[in-house]
């Protein structure tokens, strides 16, 4: 959301929309030794707004920012 300029308008879920969902990680379950995903928030906007945000020069992220974020999350 921050990389898209954080100026998107919220819309109800429907045709032509995209929904972003965020999750956190819960505590370790002593039985399974796994950490569950916990729903945090949801934001829905139009595909057109996302497309405009990606093509607007002031909203473009630094080069390779997505690759760096993915690599960091996988470490």
Image (cartoon, rainbow, N blue to C red):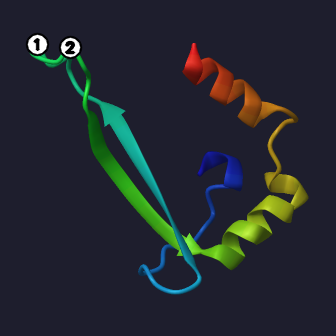
Q: Which residue occupies the extreme bottom position in the image? A: 15
Q: In which quarter of the image is residue 58?
A: bottom right
Residue at screen point 9% across, 16% down: 31
Residue at (20% x, 13% y) in the render:
33
Total of numbered circles in the picture? 2
Q: Do the residues labelled 1 and 2 touch (CB within 8 Å)?
A: yes
Seen from this angle, which residue lies furthest left? 31
| Residue position for label 1 | 30
Is 53 drawn above or below residue 63 in the view shown? below
In this rendered view, identify the residue nearer to me: 17 or 62.
Answer: 17
* Depth order, front residue of 3/32: 32
Does residue 30 sit above or below 64 in this rendering?
Answer: above
Q: Residue at x 49, y 73 (%)?
A: 10
Disc ID at residue 33: 2
Neighbourhood count class around disc 1 (C-alpha, 10 Å): few under 14, some 14–19, many 20 upward: few
Q: Hey, which residue is sitting farthest front in the picture?
A: 32
Q: Residue 66 falls in which quadrant of the image?
A: top right
Point 88% across, 35% down: residue: 63
């Amino acid at each position: 959301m921050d990389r898209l300029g954080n100026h998107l308008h919220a819309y109800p879920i429907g045709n032509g929309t995209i929904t972003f969902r965020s999750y956190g990680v819960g505590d370790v379950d002593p039985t399974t030794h796994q950490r569950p995903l916990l729903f945090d928030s949801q934001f829905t906007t139009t595909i057109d707004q996302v497309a405009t945000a990606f093509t607007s020069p002031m909203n473009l992220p630094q080069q390779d920012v997505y690759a760096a974020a993915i690599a960091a999350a996988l470490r």
